[in-house]
Amino acid sequence: MYYYWQIILEEVHLYEQRGYCCRYSNLQETDIFIEKMEDSTEIKSTAPPKVTYPLPAPYDHLYFTEREAECIYCILQGHTIKSTGILLNLSARTVEFYLKNIKTKMQLRTKSAITDQLSHLDFRTYAEIHPSLQALIATFHVEGDQVKKPSRSGLVIV
C-alpha cells in the first residue's frame, strides 16, 4: 500500500512534464492538463504598462487610472454621463462607477464638485498619455474660446 502512494505522489509532481504518462491516476485525462501543456508552449505577451495621471495640489498624493482620466476628460468637456459612455464605448453605469471612484479618491460628493476642483486640469500637459486618451483629445477641436464636440454621427457640433 505504501508503494502505491509513493507512485501517486510521483505522478502529482511529474504529470505536467511532456512525455510523462500517469499509470495510476487520471491527472492527465482532464482538460486542465491539456490547457496547461498548450499554455506552456506559447510565448506569453507582456501587457503594456498602465499609465497613471497624478493630480495637482491639493490632491498631489492621488492619481487617475487610464479609464478614470478618459471619463473625467469627457465630463470636463461638458459631456453628460450618457454621452461619455457613448464616446468611450462604455455603459452609463460604468461611467458612473468611474466617477464614484474619483469622488471617493478626492473625498467629494457631487459631479459638479469634481468639475470645480479639476476645471484647470489639462491632460495635454502630461508627459505620458495613453493612446486612447490621445485619440479622445484629438476629437475635440479648440478654435478660440469655442470647443467643438463630435456628435454620435461624427458631425462636429458648435
Image: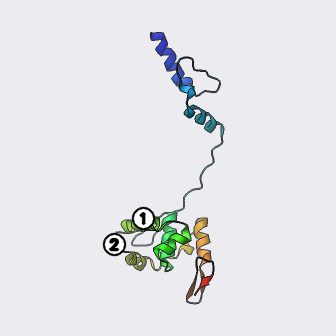
Residue at the farthest bottom position: 144
Q: Position of residue 87 (x, y in %)?
A: 55, 72
The three-letter code of the residue at mark 2 reads Arg
Q: Which mark is residue 109?
A: 2
Q: Position of residue 91 (x, y in %)?
A: 49, 66
Label 1, on which residue?
97
Number of dots carrying numbers = 2
Q: Quadrant of the C terminus?
A: bottom right
- Residue 42 is left or right of residue 9, and the answer is right
- Residue 112 is left or right of residue 21, and the answer is left
Q: Position of residue 47 (x, y in %)?
A: 59, 52
**Residue toward you, 62 or 138:** 138
Vertical position of residue 1 compared to residue 58: above or below: above
Quick one: label 1, few (<14), some, or many (20+) residues within 10 Å? few
Element type at mark 1: helix
The three-letter code of the residue at mark 1 reads Phe
Report how far apart the C-alphas of labels 1 and 2 lie in the structure. 14 Å
Residue under the point 40% across and 70% down: 59
Q: Is residue 61 visible?
A: no
